[in-house]
Image: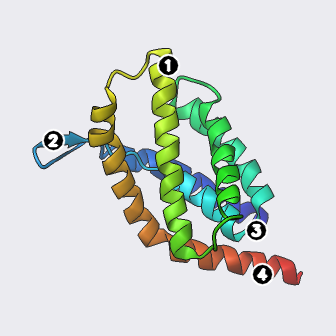
Amino acid sequence: MIRFVLPLIGIVIFYSESIFATFSPIEAAGDTRLLVPHFLVVFLLFLSFYYNRNTSYIYAFVFGLMYDVFFTGVLGIYMFLFPLLIYISALIFRLIYQNIVINGLVTLIMIALLEWIVYQFYLLIGIADMNVQAFLNHRLYSTLLFNAAFILIAAYPFKQWMSAVRFRQLED
């Protein structure tokens, strides 16, 4: 059963990102803010934290490829970055203690890193047309705030569900 539930949840989260992206940009404090949902990154990182890191690499690669095909004009950037974020977070957790609060903070750091690398890559190939200050003020801060709200809502249910699934698999 779990073979079907995890991919199904991943697909639902993948699809929900495009639904929430339709609400962006928003007008806040007299300024236009871009809200980029990274629910899939949150799901993949929590999958690596609480379920199985090797499985999360596979999901990250597959969903990264899907993300590239459906949402970007550059094939391979997310397919490479999603597994890289999982690897970097694993390196971080070799140095610090892991709990749900730290996992949420590391997830936010990984989202910021993802946004920054994609922005720098798009600058390099000439797709991005905003300067660094505009990127920080109009995209990064609002994206982090938006995803922090999602993490606050979803972190505990993800943790509980993935830990329970992992426990059931270990029992069998």
Quick one: which residue is furthest to the bottom in this view? 171
Q: Are marks 1 and 4 in contact (CB under 8 Å)?
A: no
Of callouts 1 and 4, which one flags the residue occurring earlier in the amino acid sequence? 1
> Alpha-carbon neighbours of circle 2 within 10 Å: few (<14), some, or many (≥20)?
few
Query: Seen in the image, is 155 located left or right of residue 98?
Result: left
Query: Seen in the image, is 62 located left or right of residue 142?
Result: right
Of callouts 4 and 3, which one flags the residue occurring earlier in the amino acid sequence? 3
Residue 2: x percent and y percent?
A: 76, 68
Amino acid beneath label 1: Leu
Query: Which of the two discs, 2 and 4, sits closer to the camera?
Result: 2
Mark linked to residue 124: 1
Q: CA distance from mark 4 to mark 3?
A: 12 Å
Q: Does dot 1 land on a helix, a strand or a loop?
A: helix
Query: Which of the two discs, 1 and 2, sits closer to the camera?
Result: 1
Q: Are marks 1 and 3 in contact (CB under 8 Å)?
A: no
Mark linked to residue 31: 2
Q: CA distance from mark 1 to mark 3?
A: 41 Å
Quadrant of the rendering where the C terminus is positioned: bottom right
Query: Which of the two discs, 2 and 3, sits closer to the camera?
Result: 2
Of callouts 2 and 3, which one flags the residue occurring earlier in the amino acid sequence? 3
